Amino acid sequence: AKWVYNFGDGKADGRAEMKNLLGGKGANLAEMASIGLPVPPGFTLTTEVCTHFYQNDCNYPKELTQQVEEALALVQTRTGRVFGDSTNPLLVSVRSGARASMPGMMDTVLNLGLNDQTVEALAKKSGDRRFAFDSYRRFVQMYSDVVLGIEINHFEKHLERAKEKRGVKQDCELLPEDLEKLVKSYKAVVQLELGEEFPEDPNAQLWGAIGAVFNSWMNQRAKTYRQLHDIPEWWGTAVNVQAMVFGNMGNDCATGVAFTRDPSTGTNEFYGEFLVNAQGEDVVAGIRTPQELTIKARKSHGSELPSLEEVMPSIFKELLSVRSQLEAHYKDMQDIEFTIQQGKLYMLQTRNGKRTAPAALQIAVDMAKEGLISKSQALMSLKPDLIDQLLHPTLDPKAKKEVIAKGLPASPGAAGGKVVFSADEAVRRSKDGDKVILVRIETSPDDIHGLHAAEGVLTTRGGMTSHAAVVARGMGRPCVAGAGGITVDYTAAKLTVGSVTVSEGQILTIDGSTGEVMVGEVPTVPPQLSGSFGIIMEWADEARDMKVRANAETPADARQAKEFGAEGIGLVRTEHMFFEGQRIVAMRQMILATDENDRRQALEKLLVMQREDITELFKIMDGMPVTVRLLDPPLHEFIPHTEAEMASVAKAAGVPLDRVRRRAAELQEANPMLGHRGCRLAITYPEICEMQARAIFEAAAEVGRTSKKLPVAEVMVPLVATTEELKLLKGVIEKTADAVKKEQGITFTYKVGTMIELPRAALQAGKLAEMAEFFSFGTNDLTQTTYGLSRDDAGSFLPEYKAKGIVEQDPFVSLDPDGVGELITMAVQRGRSTRPDMKMGICGEHGGDPASIEICERIGLDYVSCSPFRVPVARLAAAQSAL
Ligand code: ADP
Ligand code: MG
Ligand code: MG
């Protein structure tokens, strides 16, 4: 078997498509090499090695040693250097690389292959002793940290002391002899901590590092990250071994990171940072303030340091051409890492860049307009959930705010919350229901859970490409990075800036779009949707087959939904109209009534309210369909349960307390989900159905009389199991319609349909369709009843089902395609064979879930209906499933 893939010299065994086998980094290194970009040669141990390793008691495949030796020999040929050689040594980096970029995995080890002999050779060959020993001390520290597991503090102490002694501030100002001594002290630390010598044999170093990568796949950090991001354990990681190039050989050397477009706004501008005479992670670790790539960026950020465009103009040009080559090739914005060694550019990594939601839209629209991708590709490139992030609030521009500090605008959006200084505290407080802002000097992969729990992140060190910034953008959390004016004291759990002190638990607001940090809570306003949002929505509307409606009861929700592009209301839950303020009193009077007469009196009051509401909805939707569902929940839900509450209900409803108690007891059910609810209420209390139908039709009559566009009324009967139920209720509804028409001397059209939310209804769909003029799949209940799974009780065991792989997704979040999906498919077929032009849609939570929307498209539904804020998401998801 082939376990090792080579790349370099314009050639590669692998390709970008082979991410599963080579990991993201390895696949893209191979791809970059084969399109002729300057990539230092190297090789990739595949993810299958990792899988094999874990399936065989942590043993490698037997052919591996030989294949690695051969690959290393090829790198030696390609570089003209020899691994472990005492005159011309080859040094390598060992880099982990899973399919998806994954913090939590082993950190990269650079300069591997150095020992007391090869370092002398490196010094001689480069003519730069400082450089050679700087590389050596970096190597010993990194290797000890990530491979041998020795606390990094031990080394930092020595480094600080060395700088103090020499009287310098920067690492790169140390003299060769200082560095030489440092290496000795580092090695002494290893001896002391480990009781063993630091490995001098380059081969032992190499296999040590490779082993550390594979082992790190199962460390706690990696496991947590995988859980948070739904990355399966069996994927495994690859290992990349690559010839070193040096950004730390002097002032004609540098290392940097860049995005081919601005990851924050999406603007088509090259965006990045670099450091002269530095190596590896120096840029992101924030050891010195990085420099900008372009003159324009330098000016706009007011940086005093010259840009790459100024200090190395020809390299800058070359980098620009790499930029366009990569975008033309990958057809997406790239996040790249590069190193400049003595005036020569090397590419060390590329991947599709993480970006904010506004940037994602801007980039998709721009790239389609530039002709780099088609409109469909632009639509397909956007994860529907991104749209959700766009709809989040920003600071109210009119609000008073006390800005105490400013950092970089690293991830847009505004957030306020209680300050916490550790990831664990963030998780703890957010579990208690607090909104928190995580404040750190800088963040590391160890803090992921805290970033996740927080509303926003503030760091005092690091740039736009720092860990906090990248992760926050990925998660859609606002982030202000590198607010250097703030001093954080972890021990005292407080931050200070000037004379202001903010302690843990106090409130801070951050604005990730401007970089401002404010004390206290600053009010926010709903988002302004950009031009690219409108364009994407327009393209989505051209591409999709299914209509998108909203679930809405209040005029405000209906207006919001319409603004977001809803093409009607797919579900008006009439009971929601009865929960508010005074209305519930009338509702309770109705429930507490002892005879039909009393009940009718209470219903009279309800009729007025219901009619008003529905009139308003018809007006707002202006000729688009409005599906009104008859009362659905068990009456029990309207009656409170504590004595005190019952007493006040008795008073408000003007009935004796005893009656409230008795009625509450009567209405008590062992299993309300399957009890006296849905159409069963209307069957036993036809006068409720009559009142509701009357409200709908009187509203239709009025709006029909006063508005230009006729209302489209759809009366929906819930929880139907048998045709008889529907027949009976349709009779009541039709009779009411006729009565209203006669009374008002006006005619209007309407439809009567049913929800399909019981398996029996799905099975009987052919017969139901004789009666029903439309179907709406109530997939919340249909999932409960198909699975025999109560949504309110599933929480106690469903997580374990997911963990054990019994179910892939919570079926209440994402429609179960095999069971529930099958029933819907059948019901659609049976229904349409009776009534071919029947309109069918879905109204349940699933209507706003992209994966479920895709299933709806496949089944052939006419529309999905979801909550107003999900409407834009659904429009895009519907387009994607049609494409
Ligand atoms: P990560 O996955 O954390 O980005 P990388 O494997 O990309 O880790 O390594 C981090 C950094 O180390 C790179 O951005 C690059 O600057 C440096 N690096 C890695 N390999 C080499 C190499 N062969 N030569 C020079 N620098 C390297
Ligand atoms: Mg990298
Ligand atoms: Mg239901």
Image: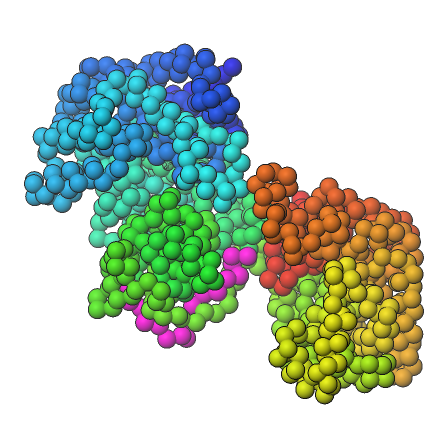
Percent position of residue 789, x then y: 70, 50
Asked if residue 243 is positioned above or below residue 338 in the image, the reply reads above
- Left or right placement of residue 792 versus residue 98 in this view: right
Answer above or below: position of 182 versus 778.
Answer: above
Q: Is residue 560 magenta?
A: no
For image coordinates 90% across by 49% down, the residue present is 833
Please tell me whether residue 784 is drawn above or below residue 163 in the rendered image.
below
Q: Which quadrant of the view contains residue 113? A: top left
Using the image as rendered, state which of residue 820 and residue 792 is in the foreground.
Answer: 792
Q: Residue at x 66, y 73 (%)?
A: 641
Where residue 257 appears, as percent x and y from the top left, is 34, 41
- The quadrant in which the C terminus is found is top right
Residue at 35 percent of width and 59 percent of height: 420
Q: Is residue 230 left or right of residue 801?
A: left
Q: Quadrant of ligand 2?
A: top left
Image location (x, y in percent) of residue 615: 74, 77
Where is residue 643, by image quadrant?
Answer: bottom right
Magenta stretch in the rendered image: 388-405
The image quarter containing residue 10 is top left
**Where does the image place residue 194, in percent across and percent down from the top left?**
24, 28
- Please name the residue shown 75% across and 81% down the image: 659
Q: Of residues 641 and 283, which is closer to you in this image?
A: 641
Specify whether residue 864 is in view.
Answer: no
Give whichever of 815, 401 is nearer the camera: 815
Number of numbered discs overlaid on the protein picture: 0
Camera sees residue 495: yes
- 801 or 254: which is nearer to us? 801
Residue 399 forms part of the magenta stretch: yes
